[in-house]
Amino acid sequence: MGSISRTTSGDMSYRMSKAALNMAGRNLHMQMKEYNTIIVQIHPGWVKTDMGGMNAAISVEESAKGIINTIENLTPNKSPGLFSIIKVIKYHGNLFFTKKLFCKNF
């Protein structure tokens, strides 16, 4: 769903929402980095859920452990990027959660 090179037809609005989320995360990272703010996008993985199906690679528990581990190990110097495993924004001591995908630094 998140790949441009392996895109198939269908699911256009869903895919567009993911692209918009990527851009929002990137822009927010650029705008907030001077405030030592942690902004990261984390893909939960291909999870065994109603959407992921029973053939998915990991369980909900495994995904949750990966997400928690990633969040617990974030630091301002380590956070800018996209990690393969919800999007976590730490701003003025508050955490805000949404979602996303893959592994590269901004």
Image (cartoon, rainbow, N blue to C red):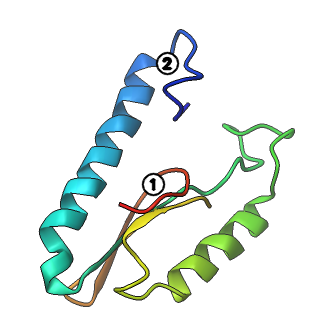
Q: Nearer the viewer, residue 10 or 34?
A: 34
| First along the sequence among labels 2 and 1 | 2
Locate residue 29, reporting x and y percent: 24, 65
Question: Image height check: is 82 above or below 4?
Answer: below
Q: Residues within 10 Å of mark 2 (few under 14, many from 20)?
A: few
Residue at the far top: name it: 9
For the residue pair 21 and 33, the one nearer the viewer reads as 33
The answer to whether residue 13 is above or below residue 28 is: above
Residue receiving disc 1: 99
Q: Is residue 49 above or below residue 26?
A: above
Q: Residue furthest right?
A: 55
Task: Kindly indicate the quadrant of the structure image that contains residue 99.
Answer: bottom left
Q: Amino acid at mark 1?
A: Lys
Q: Considering the image in quadrants, where does the N terminus appear?
A: top right
The residue shown at (42%, 18%) is 12
Q: Position of residue 57 (x, y in %)?
A: 82, 49
Left or right of residue 32, residue 80 in this image: right
* Looking at the image, residue 27 lies above or below residue 71: above
Label 2 element class: loop
Q: Which mark is residue 11?
A: 2
Quadrant showing the C terminus: bottom left
Q: Mark 2 belongs to which amino acid?
A: Asp
Query: Toward the viewer: 104 or 71?
Result: 104
Q: What residue is drawn where x is 52% and y is 50%?
A: 101
Q: Which residue is at a point 29% across and 39% down the rendered structure image?
A: 20
| Residue 94 seen anywhere in this rendered image of the structure | yes
Point 54% across, 23% down: residue: 5
Disc 2 and disc 1: Cα gap in Å?
A: 17 Å
Residue 87 visible, this orientation = no
Residue 79: horizontal and vertical position, in percent? 40, 77
Query: Which secondary structure, mark 1?
Result: loop
Q: Residues within 10 Å of mark 1 (few under 14, many from 20)?
A: some
